[in-house]
Amino acid sequence: MDKPICKALGIKVTATVFTAAASQAVARKAGFQDIFKITYEDLAGKGFVFPGIEEDTKHSKLMALVIL
């Protein structure tokens, strides 16, 4: 995420869904905050199955970064 470009374009916040624990950890270190999370078990119950993902990651997370 290039904050100077975001500032120049007037972008005040960016958000994405981080699906793996490793990317969630890196995003947190970069300043992203959790907005919403759902377990992969709950997603599977809704028909969205990600085989094997629960071995390393329990949640899919929507995370956002405020651009100051």
Image (cartoon, rainbow, N blue to C red):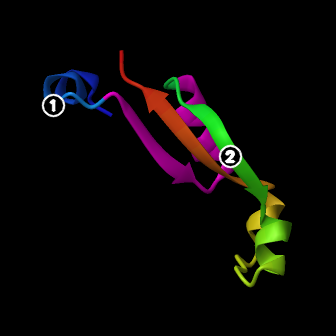
Q: From the image, which quarter does the N terminus lie in?
A: top left
Q: CA distance from mark 2 to mark 1?
A: 26 Å
What residue type is disc 1 on? Leu
Residue 42 in the image, given as x and y percentages of width and height: 83, 68
- Residue 61 in the image: state x and y as whole percent: 65, 49
Quarter of the figure with the C terminus: top left
Q: What label sits on residue 9 in the rendered view?
A: 1
The magenta stretch spans residue 13: yes
Q: Is residue 34 left or right of residue 53?
A: left
Task: Say if residue 57 shows up in the picture.
Answer: no
- Where residue 37 appears, x then y in whole percent? 72, 49
Name the spot of residue 3 as percent of width and height, x first: 28, 24
Q: Residues within 10 Å of mark 1 (few under 14, many from 20)?
A: few
* Side of 42 where 27 appears, left or right: left
Residue 34, relative to residue 18: is it above or below?
above
Q: Residue furthest bottom?
A: 47
Q: Which residues are magenta?
A: 12-29
Horizontal side of 41 relative to 16 (left or right) equals right
